[in-house]
């Protein structure tokens, strides 16, 4: 039971602090080592919430589910109150207006997204797959708790060496940032970029044809957010810290809610969600993004699906 509770705590906050920053190359990219507006304390799953989760698992009744949801809402509102207090403090003490703007954006987002985030947490805590070891990958994929029971997410974004197998098999055009159709030296383990949304879809289709036991596709924006979970306040990842992209397994101790890595920073990730202007939503931010743009709930970024971008890659959903 103790291990079970530990797993639940990890579901709310991730393990971080894996690599030393080389340098902060984007002064607007707020990182836990550089920004005083990013608090470093971790949320604690209190005994009341633990007991309600346990009660639901023993008896998954509507009453127990509602009681758990009510407690999640109480916990959420406590965090929101702290953010509002921090914002009020910054308005009185901050010398740099950007710090106020950053916290204001976080508070506004938390208010706007309250019901959605409470429901996402409830879905994870009531998923029948929730058990010790759920965030440890055995085959490169991890269950997306709160999504459909057969939905898993890839542990990493697709790498150059993985995409090269697709190029070789299909004779499709290589990404424009490769050298004469070949992966740049030393970049095999790095995320493939400069691939369009349509290229990523074709890669998934190729995988599906190669595996009769599963179907592969890009995540929806909602699935991506469910897999990522809320970005921890002190999360360590590649945004404004390095001069470019890092390998797909870098910052591997910074885990998302599902256990996947690099869901924040490094490269934006294509999703299948279409925006009103016909573009496709991208999620997670990139190495050259502001920290606030990397937040899971940030939904203001999209790209033309016909184009490739040097800071956009993709991650796969498996249906099995």
Image (tube, helix red, strand yellow):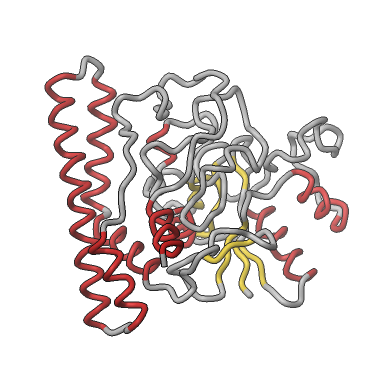
Number of numbered discs visible in the structure rendering:
0
Q: Quadrant of residue 150?
A: bottom right
Of residue 45 and residue 222, the one placed in the foreground of this image is: 45
> Which residue shows up at 57% across the image and 30% down it?
19
> Which residue shows up at 33% across the image and 73% down it?
54
Q: Position of residue 153 (x, y in %)?
A: 58, 61
Q: Position of residue 115 (x, y in %)?
A: 25, 61
Q: Is residue 19 visible?
A: yes
> Which residue shows up at 63% across the image and 50% down it?
156
Q: Position of residue 253 (x, y in %)?
A: 55, 43
Q: Quadrant of residue 206?
A: bottom right
State which quarter of the image contains the C terminus.
bottom right
> Which residue shows up at 67% across the image and 37% down it?
247
* Image position of 81 with respect to 46: above or below: above
Of residue 170 and residue 155, the one placed in the foreground of this image is: 155
The residue positioned farthest toward the front in the image shown: 2
Q: Is residue 193 visible?
A: no
State which quarter of the image contains the N terminus.
bottom left
Of residue 102 and residue 75, the one placed in the foreground of this image is: 75
The residue positioned farthest toward the top in the image shown: 95
**Left-right relation of 198 to 5:** right
* Image position of 153 with respect to 34: above or below: below
Q: Quadrant of residue 49?
A: bottom left
* Image position of 278 with respect to 17: above or below: below
**Left-right relation of 270 to 222:** right
Q: Position of residue 243 (x, y in %)?
A: 60, 22
């Amino acid at each position: 039971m103790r291990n079970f509770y530990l797993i639940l705590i990890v579901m709310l906050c991730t393990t971080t602090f894996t690599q030393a920053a080389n340098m902060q190359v984007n002064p607007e990219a707020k990182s836990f080592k550089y920004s005083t507006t990013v608090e470093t304390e971790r949320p604690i799953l209190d005994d009341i919430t633990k007991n309600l989760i346990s009660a639901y698992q023993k008896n998954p009744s509507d009453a127990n589910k509602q009681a758990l949801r009510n407690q999640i809402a109480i916990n959420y509102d406590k965090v929101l109150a702290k953010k509002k207090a921090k914002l009020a403090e910054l308005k009185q003490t901050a010398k740099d207006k950007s710090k106020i703007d950053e916290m204001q954006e976080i508070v506004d987002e938390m208010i706007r997204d309250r019901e959605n985030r409470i429901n996402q947490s409830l879905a994870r805590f009531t998923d029948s797959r929730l058990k010790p070891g759920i965030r440890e990958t055995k085959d490169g994929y991890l269950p997306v708790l709160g999504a459909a029971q057969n939905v898993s997410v890839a542990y990493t974004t697709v790498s150059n060496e993985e995409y090269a197998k697709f190029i070789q098999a299909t004779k499709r055009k290589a990404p424009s940032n490769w050298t004469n159709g070949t992966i740049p030296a030393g970049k095999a383990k790095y995320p493939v970029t400069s691939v369009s949304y349509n290229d990523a879809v074709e890669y998934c289709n190729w995988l599906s044809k190669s595996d009769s036991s599963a179907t592969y596709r890009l995540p929806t924006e909602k699935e991506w957010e469910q897999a990522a979970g809320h970005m921890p306040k002190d999360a360590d990842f590649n945004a404004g810290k390095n001069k470019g992209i890092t390998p797909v397994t870098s910052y591997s101790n910074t885990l998302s809610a599902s256990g996947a890595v690099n869901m924040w920073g490094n490269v934006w990730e294509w999703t299948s969600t279409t925006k009103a202007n016909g573009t496709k939503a991208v999620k997670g931010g990139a190495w050259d993004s502001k920290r606030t743009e990397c937040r899971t709930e940030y939904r203001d970024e999209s790209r033309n699906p016909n184009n490739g971008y040097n800071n956009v890659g993709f991650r796969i959903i498996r249906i099995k």
